[in-house]
Image: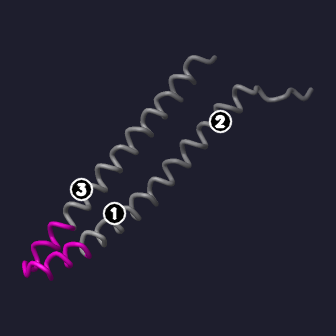
Amino acid sequence: MNESPDPEQQRRERNKIGLYAMYAGLGLSLTTEMAASGAVGWWLGSMFDDKMNSKPFGMMAGIVLFLAAALVHITIILKKMEKKMEDAEREEKKKP
């Protein structure tokens, strides 16, 4: 006998795959965001240093500020992902 798969089970499996894809994408996002923010901070800080003749303090401040902004953004993304994972687990526990 061929029984068709439970649609609810299929939906739960798709949710799991989607969450795993989000975590995989986070790794790429992390490296890209940190590299880009460091580069932009370095560039803007260097421009500030050239105008104000304050080498290397503007560059260091720019890098630190932009990396901090990237970390805040990544923290927000992680919190959203954690909430989605908890919701998926809670939904999975509800269903037999």
Q: Is residue 44 left or right of residue 54?
A: right
Quarter placement of the N terminus: top right
Q: Separation of disc 3 and disc 2 at Cα?
A: 36 Å
Extreme-left residue of the structure: 54
Q: Separation of disc 1 and disc 3 at Cα?
A: 9 Å
Q: Where is residue 42 drawn, in percent x and y?
A: 24, 74
Quarter placement of the C terminus: top right
Residue 93 counted in the magenta span? no
Question: Which numbered circle lies on residue 13?
Answer: 2
Q: Are marks 1 and 2 in contact (CB under 8 Å)?
A: no
Q: Residue at x 27, y 55 (%)?
A: 69
Within-10-Å neighbours for mark 2: few <14, some 14–19, many 20+? few
Q: Residue at x 20, y 78 (%)?
A: 47
Question: Which numbered circle lies on residue 34?
Answer: 1
| Sooner in the amino-acid sequence: mark 3 or mark 2 | 2
Q: Disc 2 residue type?
A: Glu
Where disc 3 sits, the SS reads helix
Instruction: Indicate whether 15 appears above or below 42.
Output: above
Question: Which numbered circle lies on residue 68?
Answer: 3
Within-10-Å neighbours for mark 1: few <14, some 14–19, many 20+? some
Q: Disc 1 residue type?
A: Met
Q: Picture quarter containing residue 34? A: bottom left
Q: Picture quarter containing residue 51? A: bottom left
Q: Where is residue 86 drawn, in percent x and y?
A: 46, 29
Instruction: Indicate whether 56 appears above or below 10.
Output: below
Extreme-right residue of the structure: 1
